Amino acid sequence: MVLLLRLLPVLFILAAGLVMWHVSARATIRKLAAQSHPLAEPGLAPVIEALRKALGVERLPVFVHEIPQVNGLAAPDGSVYLTEGFVRLYRQGQVSAEELASVIAHEIGHVARGHAKRRMLDFSGQNLLRFVLTGLIGRFIPVIGPWIANLITEAVAARLSQKDEFEADEFATALLLKAGIGAAPQLTLFEKLDAITGARAGVVPAWLLSHPATADRIGAIRTNLNRWNAA
């Protein structure tokens, strides 16, 4: 009984984290549904069809999120989105159909690897970690202890997020190869990415970034290609 009472705060934090994630996920799905429409670009149809055949699925619906930012995303329900900003770059000739296919393949990778479910568990775990660290560090450093605990938690969250991105990149490379598109568009898009999005290296420490550095992602893709070719 005493043990159960001691565990109650931990169980409460974990349960609260799960509830918060589910609420946030449902809100995200509703928002995306209200602000999106099906992708209907004739020039993208061949590459999407190639991805569909490679996956062996009957349909591969892709939606356009009507925001100007350049991004792709996989919703908690498994839907795949390109932003209007990304599609506009395609219409302007700044990115190719094959390069957009690499974005779609990457987001499919998030779905296939179950990253949404993993993030649900990670979110609860991070809340618990923040609670424990705040108590421990705050006991010795009362003023800045909570800030340090939050910084450590954010670093752990960033590390987990970066791992997901590398996994999705790896899946995308394999899918692009199977679809006959090849990995070259994935690499060329990454080479353009920082300039396209206006990213500035060094502004935020790499270990606090939710996405790995572009150079690291390119290096990982090349490593995978060399390993697969050698095999």
Image (tube, rainbow, N blue to C red):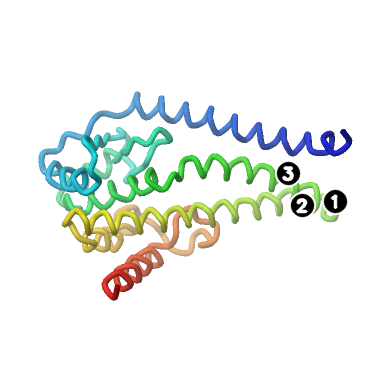
Q: CA distance from mark 1 to mark 3?
A: 12 Å
Q: Is residue 45 left or right of residue 167?
A: left
Q: How many residues crowd mark 1 within 10 Å: few (<14), some (14–19), many (20+)? A: few
Answer few, some or many: residues within 10 Å of disc 3's Cα (few below 14, many 20 plus, some between 14 and 19): some
Tag in front: 3 or 2:
3
**Residue position marked by numbered label 3 in the rendering:** 131
Q: Is residue 115 above or below residue 26?
A: below
Q: Quadrant of residue 171?
A: bottom left
Label located before the other in sequence (3 or 2): 3
Q: Position of residue 18 (x, y in %)?
A: 60, 33
Mark 1 lies on residue: 139
- Report the quarter where the C terminus lies: bottom left
Which three-letter amino acid code belongs to the residue tagged 1? Arg
Inspect this view and state whether residue 94 appears: no
- Secondary element at image label 2: helix
Q: Which residue is mark 2?
A: 145
Pick whichever of labels 1 and 2 is earlier in the sequence.
1
Q: Are marks 1 and 3 in contact (CB under 8 Å)?
A: no
> Which amino acid, mark 3?
Phe
Going 53% across and 27% down the picture, which residue do you hit? Answer: 23
Q: Earlier in the sequence, mark 1 or mark 3?
A: 3
Check if mark 1's residue and mark 2's residue have beta carbons within 8 Å. Answer: yes
Task: Give the amino acid type for the residue marked by disc 2 in the picture.
Answer: Gly
Label 3: state its secondary structure. Answer: helix
What residue is at 54 percent from the left and 39 percent from the top? Answer: 120
